[in-house]
C-alpha cells in the first residue's frame, strides 16, 4: 500500500508545471494522527506500507515531519520491516539536522531536480523568477556525501526533453546513481516531439550501457523498469495503478485523493474520495475502481500493452482528461523506452553475461507487491 | 524481510512467464534449494555460476536500488528457489526474449490527431 501525506501545500518555489495548488495549508497533528491510525487499520496484513512525505515543500514544515514520523514509529502496529518512509523535496532546503534525521530514521530521500541550470531554471524557479539550480546542486552534493542513497526525480517537458542525455550526465557527475525520469503529461506534447524520442532515448540507452561497462552502473527508470517488465512478461495486475485502493494521498485538510498528483487545489470535490474525519465516498471510489481498464482500442490490440504503463490513471488523466484514456505521447514514450530497454538488455547480456537477473525481482521503481487473496486463489487454481 | 514466502524466500513474483518458468525448471531438472542452506553457501558457488567473479561495483549496486540479496542468477517459483548457472540463465532469457521479439511486429500506435478529437469529445461531455 502506498500512502502520500501532503504535509503542506506551501512551497518556496513556483514551478510552472506543478500540479499542487499552493495555499497556506499545513497538516495539523490531530489530522495526521487519524491518518496514521487509518493507515495501520486499513492496510492488508501481507502488504508492505510505503508512506511518503510530500508537499508543497515538506521541509518548510520539518517539525511536522518529525512529529508525524514519531506518530508512525510509536504506533502499536508499526513494524520496521514492513513500513518504508520517504520524503520528496525540491532540494532548496537542507541542513545537517535534516540529514541526521533522515539517516537515523532510515527515510528515503528523493530530490526533484530537472537537470543543469539551463534546464532546471526553466521551470523550477522562486516566485521572484530566480532559478533554484545552484541551491539544489548544493543539496545534491551534500546529500550524496552524507546520505547512503539519494534519488533524483527529473521531470521533462516539450521544451527540455531533448536535453535528457545531458541531464543524465549532469546528475551522474554529481554522484547520483538512481535517476527517475518522468514526463510532464499535462504539457502539450506533439508528434514532432514524439518523433524525436527514439533518438533521445537511444542516447540515454548508450550512456546506460557505458556506465555498466565502466562498472559504474546507474539505475535509470526509463531503462531498468522496462527490462524488468520484459523479463517478467509484463506488469502483473497487482502492480498496475491501484489509485484509490492500493494508493491514497492525503491533503493537509485530511481530504483523501486517489494519488498525490490529483490533490490539485484540494477543493474537496474534484477527484476527492472523502475526508479522514468522515471516511471514503463510495461513489468516488467506484468512478476509478479500474483505472486503465477501458483503455483505447489501439491498446487492447497492441502486442506491447502488457509492458506499457497505459494503466496509470493520473498520467492518463493529465494527458486526455480521463483516467482510462491513454494519450498519444505516453504511447510513443512507452513504446520507445520498451524498445530501448530491449536493445540494452541484448547488448549488455552479450557483453557482460548475466547482468539483469536481479531485475526479475523487480526494481525500486516498481516494487513487487504482495499477492492479494484473489491472486493467491488464481494461482492455486492453476 | 518483506515479500518472504513460507521458506523465507521471495514469493512468486511474475504471472505472465509462469509457464515458461515451470517448463524451464522441468527441462533442466532444477532442484530447489533451501534459503537457510543458501545463507551459508551463497558464496561457495558451483562452476559456471558468476564465472566472472563478484565485482565490487555490482555488490554495491544491488540494494538499493535493486531488491534481493542473492547475487547469482536464480528463479523464484511457487515459493521455491532455484539457482541457475550462467548458461541456464542465458537459455532462460533467450526463451523469454524470443517470446517478446515475436510481439514486436504487432505494435499499435495511438495517433496524435485521433487523440485530439477524442479529447475534444471528452471535454464536451
Image (cartoon, coloured by chain):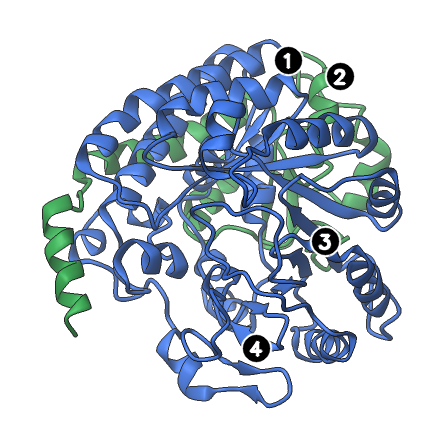
Chain colours: A blue, B green
Cα separation between marks 2 and 1: 9 Å
Q: Verify CB contact (< 8 Å) between mark 3 and mark 4.
A: no
What residue appears at the point 73 percent right and 25 percent down from the top-left corner? A141
In the picture, the disc for residue A215 is: 1
| Quadrant occupied by the N terminus of chain A | bottom right
A349 vs A109: above or below = above
- Residue beneath disc 3: A60
Give the Cα distance between marks 3 and 4.
21 Å
Q: Nearer the viewer, residue A130 or A273?
A: A130
Name the chain letter of the residue that bears numbered label 3. A
State the residue in front, A152 or B74.
Answer: A152
How far is the residue under mark 3 from the one under mark 1? 38 Å
Q: Secondary structure at mark 3?
A: helix
Residue B113: x percent and y percent? 10, 47
Residue identifier under label 4: A255
Residue, x 58% and y 58% (percent of image)?
A369
Q: Which secondary structure lies at badge 2? A: helix
Residue A348 pos. (x, y %): 48, 17
Image marks 2 and 1: residues in contact by CB distance under 8 Å = yes
Q: Would residue A67 be found to the left or right of residue B93 on screen? A: right
Mark number for residue B56?
A: 2
Q: Report crowding for label 1: few under 14, some 14 to 19, many 20 or more residues within 10 A (C-alpha).
A: some
Question: Which residue is drawn at the image coordinates 56% and 10% (left, top)?
Answer: A213
Q: Where does the image place residue A296, in percent across and percent down from the top left?
A: 20, 58
C-alpha distance separating marks 3 and 2: 39 Å
Is the C terminus of chain A in the top left, top right, bottom left or bottom right quadrant?
bottom left
Amino acid at each position: 500500500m502506498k500512502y502520500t501525506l501532503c504535509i503542506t501545500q506551501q512551497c518556496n518555489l513556483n514551478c510552472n508545471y506543478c500540479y499542487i495548488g499552493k495555499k497556506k495549508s499545513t497538516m495539523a497533528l490531530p489530522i495526521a494522527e487519524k491518518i496514521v491510525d487509518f493507515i495501520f487499520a486499513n492496510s492488508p496484513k501481507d502488504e508492505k506500507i510505503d508512506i511518503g512525505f510530500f508537499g508543497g515543500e515538506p521541509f518548510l514544515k520539518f517539525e511536522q515531519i518529525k512529529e508525524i514520523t514519531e506518530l508512525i514509529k510509536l504506533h502499536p502496529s508499526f513494524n520496521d520491516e514492513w513500513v518504508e518512509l520517504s520524503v520528496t523535496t525540491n532540494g532548496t532546503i537542507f541542513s545537517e539536522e535534516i540529514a541526521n534525521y533522515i539517516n537515523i530514521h532510515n527515510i528515503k530521500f528523493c530530490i526533484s531536480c530537472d537537470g543543469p541550470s539551463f534546464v532546471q531554471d526553466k521551470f523550477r524557479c522562486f516566485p521572484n523568477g530566480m532559478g533554484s539550480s545552484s541551491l539544489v546542486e548544493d543539496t545534491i552534493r551534500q546529500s550524496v556525501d552524507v546520505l547512503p542513497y539519494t534519488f533524483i526525480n527529473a521531470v521533462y517537458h516539450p521544451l527540455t526533453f531533448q536535453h535528457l542525455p545531458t541531464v543524465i550526465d549532469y546528475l551522474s557527475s554529481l554522484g547520483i546513481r538512481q535517476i527517475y525520469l518522468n514526463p510532464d503529461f499535462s504539457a502539450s506534447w506533439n508528434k514532432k516531439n514524439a518523433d524525436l524520442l527514439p533518438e533521445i532515448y537511444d542516447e540515454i540507452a548508450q550512456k546506460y550501457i557505458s556506465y555498466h561497462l565502466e562498472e559504474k552502473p546507474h539505475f535509470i527508470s526509463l531503462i531498468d523498469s522496462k527490462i524488468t517488465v520484459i523479463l517478467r512478461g509484463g506488469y502483473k495486475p497487482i502492480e498496475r495503478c491501484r489509485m484509490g485502493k492500493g494508493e491514497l494521498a492525503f491533503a493537509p485538510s485530511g481530504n483523501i485523493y486517489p494519488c498525490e498528483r490529483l490533490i490539485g487545489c484540494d477543493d474537496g470535490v474534484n477527484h476527492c474520495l472523502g475526508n479522514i474525519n468522515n471516511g471514503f465516498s463510495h461513489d468516488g471510489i467506484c468512478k476509478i475502481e479500474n483505472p486503465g481498464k477501458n483503455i483505447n482500442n489501439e491498446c487492447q490490440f497492441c502486442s506491447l500493452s502488457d509492458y506499457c504503463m497505459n494503466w496509470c490513471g493520473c498520467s492518463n488523466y493529465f494527458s486526455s482528461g480521463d483516467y482510462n484514456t491513454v494519450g498519444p505521447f505516453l504511447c510513443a514514450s512507452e513504446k520507445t523506452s520498451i524498445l530501448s530497454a530491449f536493445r540494452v538488455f541484448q547488448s549488455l547480456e552479450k557483453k557482460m553475461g548475466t547482468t539483469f537477473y536481479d531485475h526479475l525481482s523487480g526494481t525500486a521503481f516498481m516494487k513487487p507487491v504482495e499477492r492479494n487473496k484473489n491472486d493467491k486463489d488464481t494461482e492455486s487454481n492453476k | 524481510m518483506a515479500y518472504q514466502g513460507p521458506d523465507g524466500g521471495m514469493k512468486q513474483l511474475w504471472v505472465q512467464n509462469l509457464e515458461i518458468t515451470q517448463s524451464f525448471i522441468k527441462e533442466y531438472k532444477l532442484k530447489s534449494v533451501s534459503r537457510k542452506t543458501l545463507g551459508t553457501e551463497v558464496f561457495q558457488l558451483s562452476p559456471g555460476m558468476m564465472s566472472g567473479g563478484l565485482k565490487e561495483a555490482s555488490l554495491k549496486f544491488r540494494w538499493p536500488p535493486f531488491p534481493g540479496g542473492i547475487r547469482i542468477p536464480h528463479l523464484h517459483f511457487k515459493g521455491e528457489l532455484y539457482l541457475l548457472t550462467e548458461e541456464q540463465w542465458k537459455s532462460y532469457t533467450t526463451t523469454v526474449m524470443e517470446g517478446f521479439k515475436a510481439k514486436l511486429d504487432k505494435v499499435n500506435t495511438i495517433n496524435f490527431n485521433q487523440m485530439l478529437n477524442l479529447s475534444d469529445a471528452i471535454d464536451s461531455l
